Amino acid sequence: MDFQIEGMIGTLKFGAAKHLLPLFEAVVNSIQAIEEADNGRGNIEIRILRDTSQGTIVDEAKEHLDIIGFEVIDDGIGFNDDNYRSFDTSFSTYKAAKGGKGVGRFSWLVVFSSAAVESRYKAEGEMKCRSFDFVPRGRGIEGHKESASERTTRRTVVKLNGFRDKYRKACPKKVETIAAKIVENCLEYFLRNNCPRMLLSDVVTGNTVSLNDEFKSQLVGSASQSEFTVKGQPFTLKGLRLSPSHAKEHVVHYCANERVVKSERLAGRIDDLAKTLTDDEGREFRYAGYISASALDSLVTQDRTDFAIDESADGMFEDTLDWKTIQQDVETACAEQLKPFTKSVAADKDARIEKFIETEGPMYRPVLKYIDDKVRRLDPGVNDKQLDQELYRALQDVQVELKAEGKELLELEPSDHDFEGYTERVKSYFDKVGDINQSDLARYVCHRRAVLDFLQHQLSRTDTGKYPLEECVHNVIFPMGKTSNDVPFLKHQLWLVDEKLVYHRYLASDKPLRSMDVLDTKSAREPDIIVFDKACALVNEPDAPFGSVIVVEFKRPMRKNYNEEENPVQQVYNYVREVRDGKALMPNGRPVEVKPNVPFYCYVVCDITEKLRGQIDLLDLTPMPDGQGFFQFHKKLNAYLELVSYTKMITDAKKRNAVFFDMLKLPTNINGM
């Protein structure tokens, strides 16, 4: 059968992230060659080759030169006849006992343009030398030579040439980084007592790193090993505690035949897994788990970049391995190894969440028991803003699940033989509904406190010594130019003025009276806020008349100049007259009269300056006991009016809500401004 190597290479597809895979393959081949020689630990040197075509380079810049290839040198058994014959045979089974797929060397030609091999080996008591080039054309072998060697020591050099651009650009340039990656991917071998002595050297910079020392420097604690099964198949987990200076994150490596095939992050998959953990001796570390199993050995793909395992078990036999089940069982095994180090993290995180809920997020307390699994997976290092977002997202998930559960219960018919089970399920559902409702109420109370704090800050003097414009305060309470059709009742803050303004029939903010849907009038006056309230408790007909009309007027904080036309009390009374002279229309177009006996409630919110106080005295308004406002009943207009300062509006709102803030342990300075 004829063999074309281009076709073989074309079947191997892997991304730029696998740029060092051929180097790992070459290093493992050297380790196996030393094992086969059975001559002690042996030695491996890995040389980094750089592009020096630009001429003389200063020492500081040499480590930034592009890497163009590698050399892997070992004193193993070498390319004797058996090993060469295996190399020259595609899909060779010569190393099948060691997990060899017979295709690993083809990865060399995916990432590099060619490889050169020179090997001294012993055969029939004599030293021989064999050399050849491995190229991506024809049968792959060119320039094969074999001769006697005068040297008495075994030595094999595999030179990977012509780093292809896609992979070269992805390759790190620092010797230390490459050293760490080799150790990480060949760690199973470094754990052995007879691991070869390995050096990584940079031909251009002269920098040399002992990979054995690199392994020791990475290791914070001794390896822990545990056995477990996945669908009856035995798996082994070796867990290492690595120095944070070498390991960027907690990972689990899935291995086949003692080589890493794929790696996955553990962040967010194991409860209470902090970014960095601490052992009993106070040493910080990050965890690396290495998974091995005969099942993984047999299911690794030919290019050693993945496993031939279905993602999930849907439609498969019960005992067939699937990746989702493997992941879950592996994460459980890793969590068990890490439990001694995550207990303190869990305690600290619980204390942190408790403090956050007490001071910032009491709305989450009623539902905390329903989101415990999500809380356990939270990154212990999240800040308060992130914690709030994560808890809120978890709460929303519970609400979605609750909605689906309620729908399912409505469609479920109680079973005659399991009525107790049905009633227990219904009870559990409504218990959860009650907790969610408590959470919603608590969140609304927290929102009110935040509004009060924000508005209090807005009303403070700015750095320039000026106070905010009327629009700034107005938009906090209710957006200007909007109506209640645009702004849901939970989104405005009219409760600051009066609690009964939370619910209303129709509300318009800063709109001409003639533009309001419910009025038929030609007036161009623009009250800040006008509310048409319907006595829903007494009148149920859809076209029933309004029970009252409410007018609210805001003035700029600390405004000092008022003339007679700008007197806020007179302005409000003029609005009342305009409304009484018009005719009301319901949204369906049917007329509704604003009857003469309909009461008007008027609110003026402003700071009571000396100029305004003089005008108020002329209107015969009655001062409030606290000195922060005035009130009056205008008999002719059937209108009750209150004029209050911003300080009084906020203080009164705090007092009305204080009992709720206290219940949620939210600190509030009632009298502070």
Image (spheres, rainbow, N blue to C red):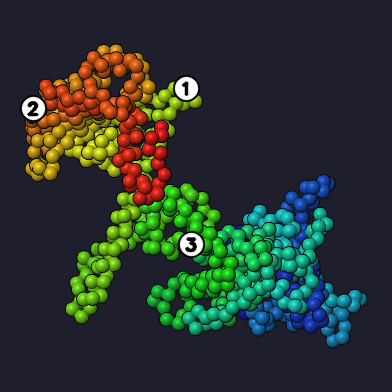
Amino acid under disc 1:
Gly
Say which element carries label 1.
loop
Q: Nearer the viewer, residue 41 or 202?
A: 41
Q: Nearer the viewer, residue 493 or 7?
A: 493
Callout 3 touching callout 1 (CB < 8 Å): no
x 41%, y 78%: residue: 316
x 22%, y 21%: residue: 621
Horizontal relation, residue 107 to residue 133: left or right: left
Question: Which residue of the protein is positioned furthest toward the top in this rendering?
Answer: 563
Amino acid under disc 3:
Arg
Q: Nearer the viewer, residue 101 or 381?
A: 381
Q: CA distance from mark 2 to mark 3?
A: 64 Å
Residue 264: in sight, yes or no? no
Q: CA distance from mark 3 to mark 1?
A: 48 Å
| Mark number, residue 596 | 2
Rendering quarter of residue 471: top left
Say which element carries label 3.
loop
Q: 10 Å neighbourhood of mark 1: few (<14), some, or many (≥20)?
A: few
**Residue 651: x, y in percent?**
34, 34
Vertical position of residue 94 compared to residue 610: above or below: below
**Residue 299: x, y in percent?**
55, 77
Q: Which residue is mark 3?
A: 377
Q: CA distance from mark 2 to mark 1?
A: 47 Å
Earlier residue among tags 3 and 1: 3
Rendering quarter of residue 608: top left
Q: Which residue is mark 1?
A: 465
x 58%, y 70%: residue: 340
Amino acid under disc 2:
Pro
Earlier residue among tags 2 and 3: 3
